[in-house]
């Protein structure tokens, strides 16, 4: 099926993803492309393109063929970005592995993907067992670009590997100078054309249900996301990006790397775990033009910056006065905007549901925030609305000319304001080719008409049925004893806003709902609560919660958890561990 891209985005270079990068790297040759936040070192677009060309030469001499799999495991660094871009522009398939995966899972992904080469951070490689990854020909250090493990080369008609990988690296500078005797110039940037249906990324999911599948994304899937980002002006030449979400995840990869590099943005790579204190410091220093965020990070900054302000008695009194609250909201908004760097157009929240109370407050003070919807299987974007046109409580509008959505009506659910509810199905340019070596899972996910079953339950709103509203995951939905469908995420959103709650999870146990709750230890310490005082506070929360949820959503007890919940790298709770 053909989708109605605007005509200008069907013409060169926009009709070919790799041509977009060829033109952009040449046009922005002297501009800064990448900055390592930790070291402060800058890399220009020209130097990045030169390093990509060196890797192309290395792949060529090492016998890597288009379509071969290259695994990539490490934190966000300039070398991570360069390796990713070198692989896809060479025609090979990149397999990003989240550095938060445990070694056994990482090795399973590397083996399952049939990767012939691994680029890995020095600090991670010692935890892996090279002997247990027999298909790997070589392991390259992301930090030093040296060969840290390899197998003897095997020559045959299809590959003709001439020498060891270490020898290739040793002679790479000399051979590169032979290839480019006059130096590397913008006119030397030239990327081959590959069919748009060619797989260029296998992205393994890290979902909350415990199952990891290799999502095959094509050049066309990435083009849909990248051209939408260009068309929407999410990034632009010299715009500033602070990359703190893992680039190995589709969300950060698309909108903190692929789109910025397609337009000449300046990306600063945090390279560290984004704790609220570190992130606020980096945001002030980098002053990004656009912020890509997951709900947990936004909610923690909200609690750190906003909640202490609005809970002070003088502020509470002022907010109760008519005609004054707008002035106070303006002050709070300005303080929050400044905390995020003060120079951004908007904050785009995605990856998980945003707490409804946080969303309501941010909208009330007109904080420039919007919510998008996506999944790895769409590389990732499905829906988005700019913050000025964002419909509160929604997940944005399906991407015009790129994606479409419909509801698989669940007749057991009541209509929502006249709209049928059920599983959200999507179709379009961004939908994956399938799951790698898993035709059964592919057939279960994508029906014969090309509709991808997202597993999210919700409805579409007027006027054109393009705005998506999500209630919760189909797999987490609980069926009550009297046949009511319960979405635990809706109950959790209410409990999360109550005193002393850091994070929570609602599960079914023996036919009753139980809330597992990890307390806000800072607030507990600040208020001097002992264990009994905390239990009493949670009992008060339980009474307050059951007063505002439907009778069939009543929670029987709150169980206090001493440790934070296990999470995926994008900071979603691994729900399957707590059933």
Image: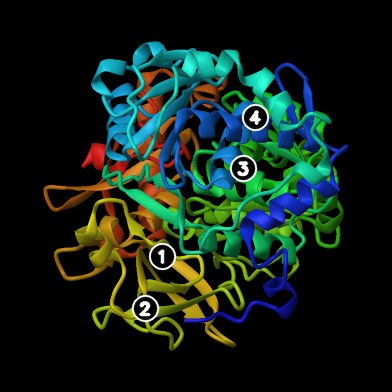
Pointer 3: residues within 10 angstroms few (<14), some, or many (20+)? many
Q: Which mark is residue 298?
A: 3
- Tag 2 near tag 3, CB within 8 Å: no
- Tag 2 near tag 1, CB within 8 Å: yes
Pick whichever, 523 or 436, lies toward us: 436
- Give percent across and percent down for residue 28: 84, 45
Q: Residue at x 58, y 42 (%)?
A: 299
- Give percent across and percent down for residue 436: 31, 51
Q: Is residue 483 left or right of residue 384?
A: left
Q: Which mark is residue 421?
A: 2
Q: Residue at x 34, y 43 (%)?
A: 505
Does label 4 or label 1 sit earlier along the sequence? 4
Tag 2, which secondary structure? loop
Q: Is residue 462 left or right of residue 443?
A: right
Image depth: mark 4 or mark 1 in front: 4
Q: Is residue 14 visible?
A: yes
Label 2 – label 3 distance at C-alpha:
29 Å
Q: Which mark is residue 39?
A: none
Tag 4, which secondary structure? helix
Pick whichever, 386 or 29, lies toward us: 29
250 relative to 36, above or below: below
Q: Is residue 185 left or right of residue 70?
A: right
Looking at the rendering, which quadrant does residue 400 occupy? bottom right
């Amino acid at each position: 099926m053909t989708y109605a891209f605007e005509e200008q985005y069907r013409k060169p270079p926009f009709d070919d993803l790799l041509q977009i990068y060829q033109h952009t790297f040449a046009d922005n040759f002297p501009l800064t492309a990448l900055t390592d936040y930790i070291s402060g070192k800058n890399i220009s677009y020209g130097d990045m393109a030169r390093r990509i060309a060196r890797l192309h030469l290395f792949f060529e001499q090492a016998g890597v063929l288009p379509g071969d799999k290259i695994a990539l495991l490490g934190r966000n660094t300039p070398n991570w970005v360069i390796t990713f871009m070198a692989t896809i522009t060479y025609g090979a398939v990149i397999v990003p592995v989240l550095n938060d995966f445990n070694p056994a899972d990482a090795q399973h992904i590397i083996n399952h993907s049939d990767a012939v080469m691994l680029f890995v951070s020095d600090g991670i490689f010692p935890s892996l067992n090279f002997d247990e990854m027999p298909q790997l020909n070589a392991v390259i250090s992301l930090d030093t670009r040296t060969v840290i493990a390899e197998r003897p080369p095997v020559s045959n008609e299809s590959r003709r590997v001439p020498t060891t990988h270490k020898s290739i690296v040793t002679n790479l500078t000399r051979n590169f100078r032979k290839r480019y005797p006059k130096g590397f110039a913008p006119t030397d940037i030239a990327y081959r054309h590959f069919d748009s249906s060619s797989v260029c990324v296998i992205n393994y999911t890290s979902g909350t249900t415990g199952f990891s599948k290799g999502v095959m994304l094509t050049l066309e899937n990435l083009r849909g996301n990248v051209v939408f980002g260009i068309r929407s002006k999410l990034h632009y030449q010299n715009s500033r990006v602070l990359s703190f979400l893992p680039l190995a995840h589709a969300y950060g990869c698309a909108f903190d790397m692929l789109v910025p590099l397609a337009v000449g943005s300046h990306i600063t790579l945090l390279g560290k775990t984004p704790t609220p204190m570190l992130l606020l410091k980096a945001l002030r220093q980098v002053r990004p033009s656009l912020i890509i965020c997951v709900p947990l990070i936004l909610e923690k900054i909200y609690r750190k910056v906003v909640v202490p302000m609005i809970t002070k008695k003088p502020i509470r009194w002022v907010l109760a006065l008519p005609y004054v609250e707008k002035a106070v909201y303006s002050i709070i908004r300005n303080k929050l905007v400044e905390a995020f760097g003060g120079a951004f157009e908007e904050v785009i929240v995605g990856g998980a549901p945003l707490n409804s109370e946080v969303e309501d407050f941010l909208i009330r003070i007109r904080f420039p925030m919007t919510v998008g919807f996506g999944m790895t299987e769409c590389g990732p974007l499905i829906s988005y609305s700019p913050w000025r046109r964002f419909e509160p409580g929604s997940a944005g509008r399906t991407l015009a000319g790129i994606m479409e959505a419909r509801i698989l009506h669940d007749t057991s659910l009541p209509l929502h304001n006249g709209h049928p509810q059920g599983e959200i199905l999507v179709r379009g340019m961004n939908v994956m080719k399938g799951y790698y070596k898993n035709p059964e899972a592919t057939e279960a996910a994508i029906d014969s008409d090309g509709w991808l079953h997202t597993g999210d339950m919700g409805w579409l709103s007027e006027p054109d049925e393009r705005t998506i509203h999500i209630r919760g995951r189909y797999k987490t939905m609980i069926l009550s004893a009297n046949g009511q469908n319960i979405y635990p995420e809706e109950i959790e959103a209410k409990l999360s806003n109550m005193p002393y709650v850091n994070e929570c999870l609602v599960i079914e146990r023996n036919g009753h709902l139980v809330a597992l709750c990890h307390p806000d230890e800072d607030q507990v310490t600040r208020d001097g609560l002992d264990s009994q005082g905390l239990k009493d506070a949670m009992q008060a929360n339980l009474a307050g919660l059951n007063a505002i949820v439907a009778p069939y959503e009543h929670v029987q007890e709150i169980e206090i958890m001493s440790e934070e919940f296990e999470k995926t790298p994008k900071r979603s709770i691994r729900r399957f561990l707590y059933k």
